[in-house]
Amino acid sequence: DIMQTSDSSHHGIVENSPYTTPYDRRVEGDQLGASWYFSRKEIEENSLSRRDGIDLKKESYLRKSYCTFLQDFGMRLKVPQVTIATAIVFCHRFFLRQSHAKNDRQTIATVCMFLAGKVEETPRPLKDVVLISYEIIHKKDPAAVARIKQKEVYEQQKELLLIGERLVLVTLGFDMNVHHPYKPLVEAIKKFKVAQNALAQVAWNFVNDGLRTSLCLQFKPHHIAAGAIFLAAKFLKVKLPADGEKVWWQEFDVTPRQLEDY
């Protein structure tokens, strides 16, 4: 059974799901997006995985593991980095409200990639998603490629994905709205008169590294972009503009102290 459930039927995982709005923080004025940001302490102390005996170290490992899977999966599906990033954010949000002990991370990650493809208008056929995901999950098994092409095995995996899709949608409260740091990052760097290409590349890499952590559950995208530029400038020993009407970080509505915190 790939997606473990406490209920004997797959459908029970949806109907009897224990999730609520994370940590009982009420969503005001239907602004679901506002409910996706928490302090690191809140995320770590209220983890449903923790209640099921998964410690912080193990949970961090599981988080990095499904991010690696999604990066590989997205590259095999030939989707843009933004689609991969959206799938990763969906996965992070899912496991904010559900436990790793009750949900197979690779199945959930596969569903998140399928959904991200639709949301970012880079959809991939369900068949490709099922086949490639199965091959990656079973990459140590030489017989896997032939096995997933058997009608019965393929249909079973497809059904699992469609049940998982419903679970992910319900868990996320049907909120598919995701913004990334890439756009504010590139727009800000364009205005600088410094080594733009090098700065953009290093900052972009820092954003991608940050995706493997819970940063996107703690900080808004433009704040992460500012933090990435700050780190990239430090790394490259580049002095960012601090004269004229605006110092660079005012573009992002952050303070130097907040940047140090990232």
Image (cartoon, rainbow, N blue to C red):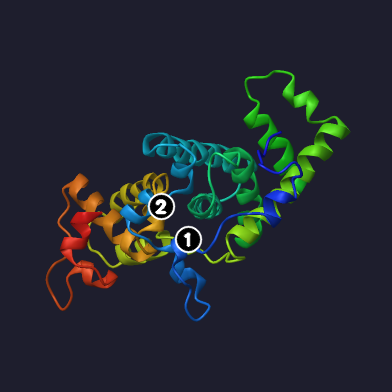
Q: Is residue 202 left or right of residue 81?
A: left
Q: Position of residue 256 (x, y in %)?
A: 16, 63
For the residues labelled 1 and 2, say whether their Cβ atoms are less than 8 Å apart: yes
Image spot of residue 61 (x, y percent) = 43, 35
Decide which of 121, 255 is in the foreground and name it: 255
Residue drawn at x 47%, y 72% as measured from the top left: 26
User: Which residue is the site of mark 2?
Assistant: 46
Q: Earlier in the sequence, mark 1 or mark 2?
A: 1
Single out the residue that lies furthest toward the top. Answer: 142
- Classify 250 as above or below 141: below
- Where in the figure is residue 28, as x and y percent of width and height? 47, 78
Q: Is residue 191 visible?
A: yes
Gap between marks 1 and 2 measured at Cα: 9 Å
Residue pictured at 40% horizontal, 63% vertical:
37
Who is closer to the viewer here, 139 or 100? 100
Q: Amino acid at mark 2?
A: Asn
Residue density around tag 1, few if under 14, some if 14–19, many if 20 or more, within 10 Å: many
Splitting the image into 4 quarters, where does residue 150 fall?
top right
Q: Residue at x 29, y 54 (%)?
A: 228
Q: Secondary structure at mark 2?
A: loop
Q: Quadrant of residue 35?
A: bottom left
- Residue extending furthest left? 243
Is 68 left or right of 234, judged from the image as shown? right
Q: Judge whether 179 appears above or below 82 on screen.
A: below
Q: Which residue is mark 1?
A: 22
Where does residue 90 sit, x and y in percent of width and height? 54, 54
- Count residues near mark 2 (Cα–Cα under 10 Å), then give few for <14, some for 14-19, many for 20+: some
Looking at the rendering, in which quadrant would you find the C terminus?
bottom left
Pick the quarter of the image with the N terminus: top right
Which structural element holds mark 1?
A: helix
Q: Residue type at mark 1?
A: Pro
Instruction: Say above or below: 102 vs 35.
Output: above
